[in-house]
Amino acid sequence: MDKKVFSGIQPTGEVHVGNYVGAIRNWIKLQDEYESMYCVVDYHSITIPYEAAELPDRVLELGATLMACGLDPEKAILFVQSSVPEHTELTWFLTSITSIGALERMTQFKDKSARQRGNTFAGLMNYPVLQTADIIIYKANLVPVGEDQVQHLELAREITRRFNAMFGDVFPEPQPLLTSGARVMALNDPTAKMSKSVEGSYITITEEPESIRKKIRRAVTDPGPQGGDMGPGVKNLFILLEGFAEPDVVAQFKEDYSNQKLRYADLKNTLAEAIVSYTTPIREKRNELLSRPEELKEILAAGGDKARAQAKETMKEVRERMGFFMPVR
Ligand code: TYM
């Protein structure tokens, strides 16, 4: 059987270069190789405080950004999670076979709930169950993500195994697919991951050139002795350089580092210009797409129709296996 790809991204803030290098670039490559589905996970985005009035723009902006990055709705199914309410039905079923202890052990849950200071809602804890449902409802095998999502995918595999053991072999076990940039670190603190929710840590994929230059200039390096292992700040700049510059440019800077001749100012200038020239067409294309919001909405809705047809088929099978016999009319 041919493998199928599924991945998702939350409409919380702008897409940053970590999302791009860690996941989205891989999505664009995979859409040529596999049957692929990519989802704007708006249900996930409400697990932290949010403004309902802002959600529609965030969803459309993210759809536009993904298409501007090169996601092609003719090649992959691009859709919004809330177009397919079956995701939530499967989530409910899966919560009945998921251990609370496992959910409480998730690093992302621990981090995010600590930030809510004791006011944590159940949705945040169940976030990985919804993520599992997203993937398996389409019987996807491969999940291109950044490294921070590996733990959620381990849990997804565990839940899938339990379902199959209890109700019969319905779902394949999904596997994470990582790239070399699977962990892009924060520019202001290279020991923490680049994150949408930490100001100063990221550069967005649609950021203005002057702001990109300023942020790269200020990025923390850790100028130790060159030639041996790189410190986390320098290593992070190289991960970004690999993401945005030509291979020969990367090779030259690596050689300079080995020969202890690297000038950090040169590395930063080259990196900033590489990001600027790589992202300028993306920024322009995104603005163009956003100037026709109705068209954009229609493209996403059409993706939702295709996804929903598949999800309904799976849910028919799941309901039957789990003993729900009433027709859904
Ligand atoms: P989100 O929106 O937080 O992140 C989207 C993707 O970007 C990756 N990523 C990174 N990669 C490298 N370095 C970083 N600093 C960095 N920060 C983020 C994430 O790993 C992710 O691949 N839970 C998912 C959304 C989701 C999902 C799914 C993914 C919901 N359902 C089903 C796969 C399959 C998330 O965290 O998205």
Image (tube, rainbow, N blue to C red):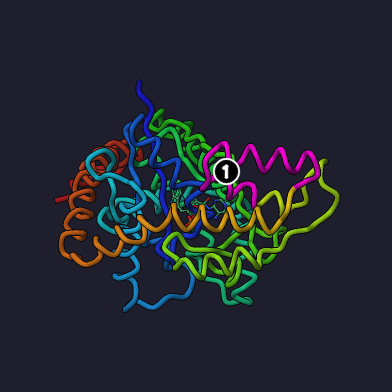
- The residue at 39%/35% (across/down) is 30
Which x, y percent locates residue 161? Answer: 51, 34
Whether residue 60 sits left or right of residue 240 in the image: it is: left
223 or 74: nearer the viewer: 223
Whether residue 188 sits left or right of residue 9 in the image: it is: right
Magenta stretch contains residue 312: no
- The residue at 53%/45% (across/down) is 245
Q: What residue type is disc 1 on?
A: Glu
- The residue at 72%/58% (across/down) is 191
Which quadrant is the N terminus positioned in? Answer: top left
Which x, y percent locates residue 198? Answer: 59, 69
Q: Is mark 1 within 8 Å of ligand 1?
A: no
SS assignment at label 1: helix
Hey, which quadrant is residue 115 in on the image? Answer: bottom right
Q: Which residues are magenta?
A: 237-261
Vertical arrangement, residue 232 with respect to residue 169, above or below: below
Whether residue 147 sits left or right of residue 206 in the image: it is: right
208 or 168: nearer the viewer: 208
Residue density around tag 1, few if under 14, some if 14–19, many if 20 or more, within 10 Å: many
Looking at the magenta stretch, what is its main secondary structure?
helix
Which x, y percent locates residue 6? Answer: 39, 41
Which x, y percent locates residue 2? Answer: 35, 23
200 or 42: nearer the viewer: 200
Vertical arrangement, residue 242 with respect to residue 263, above or below: above
Most extreme residue toward the right is 225
Residue pointed to by mark 1: 242
Most extreme residue toward the top is 1
Vertical arrangement, residue 10 with respect to residue 32, above or below: below
How many tags in the picture? 1
- The residue at 34%/71% (across/down) is 55
Magenta stretch contains residue 259: yes
